[in-house]
């Protein structure tokens, strides 16, 4: 019984509320550094969210998500500064470009299986970065300046948040976007489309046999993840007030993969946990810059060997064990685990 | 100009073949898409540099570096990759984690500066009015004979048979009494050693930093897809195609286009023959 309760927790509002509360933390001690940490956490949480939808939900490991962000960011900057479009329209079109690029990838995802697709995404990302570094319009390797002064103010909680300000305002914008997109992804996971995504991931043949169309499910996942990547890319550019190819290079995509594995791929909590982990390792931890990446790598190696489900799954299992201990006073034999495919199908029946 | 372009194309092909061959062996036998292959390659170059600083002559430094990387490969396979044998994705994630660790080690030990090893040979060969650098010709010769012999061994020799049987179906192979675990360890170690050989040879021709690994890794991925993932023959063919295509487009078109050529070749191959030139059609998902 207890087991069941814990398992159904992600169905509740926790995956939406937990990150939202995380972002309220800087308000307890509103310093520039804390706002900046929260902003960084939101930005990296969005990269991971984008990857979680394609890799965690439908099982396609894409290393092109960050490059899709570059499409959104460069589209936004070029349209707004060089063609004089209003910011909102430029942002909308930039995100639209990222979604289109993501759909192109999804066409490949249906044609190629497993690692072939992953390698294709590496080269797809490389094409995007190569085009950028060879284009004068995109500022080659020096990049383009992103003016933040034209950003509007947000009225929230009875306060005015001038989003142009690096202090507070931009943090509010980034956090709000993350919480909204994360909530959308959590909702998606609970719809029948979401259940279809999980079953395509776990057992494509079984999914087809119960009438799920992998084409529809995967395309939907790529559209949404491209959307998130586009928003993340634009916010990254706005945050640094500069778009340069390095912001969207392959090593950033690899960091995203490490973060999502550490946090727990496929978990609805993964994006928030990953954002927090990034802030701790890359900004808050008092260690020399060169060692930060290595530390993340070492953690991931340990997690893969010891806790394959990542932090999210590990915590949940630990909590389950702890609860059972306190309720019964003694541990009981672990019930046999259901096959993953059966579990998701059972879930989709529940909801149908 | 034609001769020069041909030489530089063959040189690129030789370098790419060295880089991709080990990746193909590791994928073919162990089913691991080893992202850390590029990191091992560049680590080999750094180690050779350090051994030379320590007073070893170039050849000894190279041998020591290759041996050290082979040892690292052996330890990694025994300690890490063997534990996730049944989950290819976990192997891939491990290798990405190892890149992050390797980059940290390289940055803190060597910093961001560029290094280089001395050339193997200094002179150049003059044919007509074109000058061909001798060291590049030597590397082409070394790669062609070395990889040619290994490829021949895989196709004909007893150990090649063990390797192919394990790659084909490790369970069936182990039922035939093939020591599958040992074959896999040896394959991974050999792949690491090949990466180091490639790294050292490249470092004698061009300055390098930590990014060398990433750039060559991407090329090597493209090559093994063109040739058919896991096929060493395919890796050689893919490297040849890519090296020549790049050299000729650099000479006759522009460097910007040459950067995109590998990707164009890849797109054509994927559309026309998704399993690669020498790939088998399998139901692997």
Image (spheres, coloured by chain):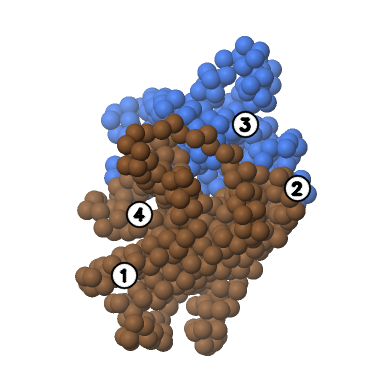
Viewer-side residue, B226 vs A235: A235
The residue located at (66%, 13%) in the rendering is: B176
The answer to whether marks 4 and 2 sit on the same chain is yes
**In front: mark 2 or mark 3?**
2
Residue A90 in the image: above or below residue A26: below
Q: Element type at marker 2?
A: helix
Residue positioned most to the top? B177
Earlier-in-chain disc, 4 versus 2: 2
| Hue used for the chain lettered A | brown
Question: Label 3: chain?
Answer: B
Residue carrying label 3? B28
| SS state under label 4 | helix
Which residue does the numbered mark 4 point to in the structure image? Answer: A277
- Nearer the observer, disc 4 or disc 2? 2
> On the image, numbered disc 2 is attached to which residue?
A209
Q: Are marks 3 and 4 on the same chain?
A: no
Most distant residue in the right direction: B272
Judging by the rendered image, the residue that carries numbered circle 1 is A24
Question: Which dot, 3 or 4, sits closer to the camera?
Answer: 4
Residue B69, how many percent across, how many down?
42, 29
Front-lying residue, B239 or A196? A196
Residue B71 picture location, percent across and down: 41, 25
Q: Secondary structure at mark 3?
A: helix
Q: Residues under labels 1 and 4: Cα distance?
A: 17 Å
Of tags 3 and 1, the one toward the viewer is: 1
Q: What tint does the image give chain B?
A: blue
Question: Crowdedness of circle 4 by 10 Å Cα count: few (<14), some, many (20+)?
Answer: many
- The alpha-carbon separation of the residues under discs 3 and 4 comes to 35 Å
Label 3: few (<14), some (14–19) or many (≥20) C-alpha neighbours in 10 Å: many
Does residue A7 lie above or below A14 as drawn? above
């Amino acid at each position: 019984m207890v087991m069941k309760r814990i398992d159904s927790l992600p169905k509740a509002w926790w995956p939406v509320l937990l990150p939202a509360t995380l972002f309220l933390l800087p308000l307890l001690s509103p310093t520039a550094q804390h706002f900046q940490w929260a902003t960084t956490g939101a930005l990296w949480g969005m990269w991971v969210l984008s990857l979680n939808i394609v890799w965690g939900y439908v099982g396609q490991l894409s290393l092109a998500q960050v490059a899709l962000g570059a499409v959104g960011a460069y589209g936004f900057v070029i349209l707004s500064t060089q063609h004089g479009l209003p910011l909102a329209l430029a942002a909308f079109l930039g995100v639209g470009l990222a979604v289109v690029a993501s759909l192109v990838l999804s066409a490949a995802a249906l044609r190629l299986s497993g690692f072939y697709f992953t390698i294709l995404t590496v080269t797809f990302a490389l094409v995007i970065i190569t085009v950028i570094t060879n284009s004068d319009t995109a500022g080659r390797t020096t990049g383009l300046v992103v003016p933040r002064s034209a950003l509007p103010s947000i009225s929230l909680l009875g306060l005015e948040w001038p989003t142009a300000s690096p202090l507070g305002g931009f943090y509010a914008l980034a956090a709000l976007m993350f919480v909204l997109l994360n909530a959308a992804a959590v909702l998606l996971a609970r719809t029948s489309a979401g259940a279809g995504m999980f079953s395509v991931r776990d057992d494509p043949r079984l999914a087809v046999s119960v009438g799920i169309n992998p084409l529809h499910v995967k395309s939907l996942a790529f559209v949404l993840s491209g959307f998130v990547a586009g928003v993340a890319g634009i916010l990254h550019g706005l945050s640094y007030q500069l778009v340069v190819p390095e912001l969207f290079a392959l090593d950033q995509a690899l960091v995203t993969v490490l973060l999502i594995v550490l946090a727990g791929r496929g978990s609805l909590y993964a994006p928030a946990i990953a954002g927090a982990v990034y802030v701790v390792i890359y900004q808050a931890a008092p260690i020399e810059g060169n060692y930060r990446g290595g530390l993340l790598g070492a953690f991931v190696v340990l997690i893969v060997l010891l806790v394959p489900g990542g932090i999210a799954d590990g915590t949940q299992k630990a909590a389950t064990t702890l609860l059972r201990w306190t309720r019964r006073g003694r541990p009981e034999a672990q019930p046999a685990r259901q096959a993953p495919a059966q579990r998701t199908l059972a879930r989709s029946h529940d909801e149908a | 100009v034609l001769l020069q372009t041909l030489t530089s194309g063959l040189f690129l092909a030789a370098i790419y073949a060295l880089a991709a061959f080990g990746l193909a062996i590791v994928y073919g036998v162990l089913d691991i898409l080893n992202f850390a292959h590029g990191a091992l390659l560049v680590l080999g170059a750094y180690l050779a540099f350090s051994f030379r600083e320590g007073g070893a002559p170039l050849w000894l430094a190279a041998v020591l570096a290759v041996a050290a990387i082979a040892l690292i490969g052996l330890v990694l396979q025994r300690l890490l990759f063997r534990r996730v044998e049944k989950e290819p994705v976990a192997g891939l994630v491990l290798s990405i984690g190892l890149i992050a660790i390797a980059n940290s080690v390289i940055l803190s030990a060597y910093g961001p500066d560029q290094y280089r090893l001395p050339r193997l040979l200094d002179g150049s060969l003059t044919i007509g009015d074109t000058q061909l650098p001798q060291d590049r010709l030597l590397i082409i010769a070394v790669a062609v004979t070395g990889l040619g012999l290994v490829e021949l061994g895989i196709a004909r020799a007893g150990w090649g048979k063990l390797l192919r049987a394990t790659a084909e179906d490790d369970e069936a192979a182990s039922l035939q009494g093939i020591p599958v675990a040992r074959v896999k360890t040896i394959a991974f170690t050999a792949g690491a050693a090949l990466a180091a050989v490639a790294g050292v040879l490249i470092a004698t021709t061009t300055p390098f930093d930590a990014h060398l690994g990433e750039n060559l890794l991407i090329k090597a991925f493209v090559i093994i897809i063109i040739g058919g993932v896991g096929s060493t023959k395919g890796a050689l063919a893919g490297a040849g195609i890519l090296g020549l295509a790049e050299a000729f487009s650099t000479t006759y078109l522009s460097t910007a286009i040459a950067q995109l050529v590998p990707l164009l070749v890849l797109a054509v191959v994927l559309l026309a023959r998704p399993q690669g030139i020498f790939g088998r059609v399998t139901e692997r998902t």
